[in-house]
Each structure stands twice: as structure tokens, then as C-alpha cells.
Image (cartoon, rainbow, N blue to C red):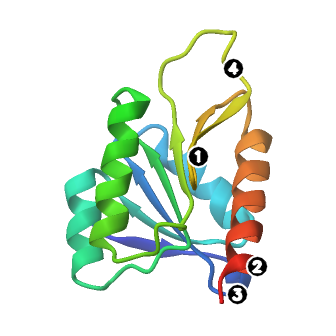
Amino acid sequence: MREMIEGRENKGRVTILYVEDDDDTRPGIKRLLISHGYRVVITGNEEEAQERAQDGRIHADLLLIDLGMPPADVLAAGHRIRHAALTDDKTPLVVMAFKYNSEMEGQDVHAGHHDWVTYLENAEQLELLIDRLLREHLTASP
């Protein structure tokens, strides 16, 4: 997959690394992120994200990952990507859960120091979570 970097206004060059293995989901989330002014780097899997991160082509302010695996496995993949990118462990990691029951829908679950699992109800939920995490991360960074 060709690396896609896009963004309008670029919110001060804030970059989101979006790892998504579903070709049908990718365009909608990409449009959402770009419409909010984020610079978006998209990869289709963990290996591609690690490869790009290791060669220094990616500096992400937030990792957004949606892979067809249980959240714990996706969190582990996110930690490997974050490590490969040599980003701070404080770089927010958001996992979009792919299967969940109606009781979980609409919840954002804190899964570690700077790790979150979101059980999406709608796009606004994702927007609010990302905006909040980036605001906290970028104001806390030296």
C-alpha cells in the first residue's frame, strides 16, 4: 500500500498514524481525521507501520489502530509500533474495537497509562477522544 499523507490546515502539523486493515473502513475514518485538520499517515497493517516508523518516515503524535483482532492483541501491536517509531511511551494509542456487545457501545476504556480502547457508537465519540488525548499529550510535552 502506498503511503498516504494528507491534511487540511494540519493543526500545527499534528500527525496521526492510522493503521487499518479494512479497505472499507479506511476511507471514512481518513476523511473524518482530515476534515478536522490532522495530518494522516495510513498503513494497512502492523508490519508496514513498523517498517515506515523504523526508517524515520513517521513521527506520530497519536496512534489510531483498527485491526481485526481482539483489543489486547491490537494494544500489543500498538506498543510494538510505538517502540519502532521511537516515540515516547506517552504518545497516545487508541484501539478501535472491532467486535463488542451493545453494553460496551459508546464507551472509551482506559487500558494503560496512555492507551485507550474505544467501542464506537458514532464518529463524534472518536473525534472527542482524539481531540482530548492530543490536547493533553501536546500540552504535557516539553
Q: Residues within 10 Å of mark 3 (few under 14, many from 20)?
A: few
> Which amino acid does the dot numbered 3 rest on?
Gly
Q: Which mark's residue is nearer the viewer, 2 or 3? A: 2
Q: Which residue is mark 1?
A: 28
Residue at 24% across, 65% down = 50
Q: Amino acid at mark 1?
A: Gly
Q: Secondary structure at mark 4?
A: loop
Residue 89 versus residue 22 in the image, above or below = below
Residue highlighted by disc 3: 12
Amino acid type at mark 4:
Glu
Q: Is residue 1 visible?
A: no
Dot 1 surroundings within 10 Å: few (below 14), some, or many (20 or more)?
few
Q: Which residue is mark 4?
A: 105
Quadrant placement of the N terminus: bottom left
Residue lying at 67% horizontally and 54% vertically, measured from the top left: 32
Spatial separation of the CA atoms under disc 1 and disc 4:
19 Å
* Mark 2 or 1: the one toward you: 2
Nearest to the eye among marks 4 and 2: give it: 2
User: Residue 118, percent across and down?
Assistant: 62, 36
100 shown above or below 91: above
Work out which residue is located at the far top of the displayed protein and give it: 102
Residue to which mark 2 is pinned: 139
Helix, strand or loop for disc 3: helix
